[in-house]
Amino acid sequence: MTEEKKDFRLNWATLKLAVILFAFAAVVAVALGLVNKITSERIAAFEAEKTAAAMREVLPAESYTPVEGSAASKVELVKEIYDAGGSGWVIMVTPSGFGGEIEMAVGVDKSGAVTGVSIVSMSETSGLGANAKRESFRSQYTGKGGSVALRKQGGEIDALTGATVTSTAVTKGVNAALAAANELIRGAGA
């Protein structure tokens, strides 16, 4: 067999393999697309219910109305603001922790005091930063106003052992919510 014929067979075998791999990848991509389409609505509904439950936990109200176009919505880390039936606001904030973004709901009443903190989602280290979800940690913020700080920074909040980055992130999130609420209070008084 001549050298030219060997090269042609080798190229044909390579091309055949490439076509088979492409077809396999296309089938898998279509299957993944279908699964995503089927599950995306359920996932969105689950996330919405999780957020609604967090809002009810931090500041119970009959309804939550989005607050748009205020200076408060421009405060760093603030994702969304909801009026909690006139009794205060639920402010969604997203500070960055050790494992990435922490999505939190912070309730603030009309006097500017925290009514509750709920962690909606996080990817913090299990057994360390993930302990920020515990009520014993989150409850330290309830009733606080103005600005809060960790004890090691001269404040009243005890950091989670071994999770200073997460503790700092949650504190930054609460402070962002308090700043946004103070903007709303100033805007209402003007």
Image: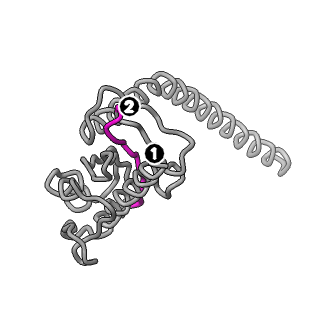
| Image quadrant where residue 55 sits | top left
The amino acid type of the residue labelled 2 equals: Tyr
The magenta segment: 85-96
- Quick check: 9 left or right of 94? right
In the structure shown, which secondary structural element does the residue marked by tag 1 occupy? helix
Mark drawn on residue 64: 2
Percent of width and height locating residue 155: 24, 72
Residue 92 part of the magenta segment: yes
Which numbered marker is on residue 74?
A: none
Residue ID for mark 1 = 188
Residue in the foreground of this view, choosing between 47 and 154? 154
List x then y, in percent, for residue 52: 33, 32
Provide residue 149's location: percent of width, then percent of height: 29, 69
**Type of amino acid under label 1:** Ala
Depth check: 33 or 101 in front? 101
Categorize mark 2 by other alpha carbons within 10 Å: few (<14), some (14-19), many (20+). Answer: many
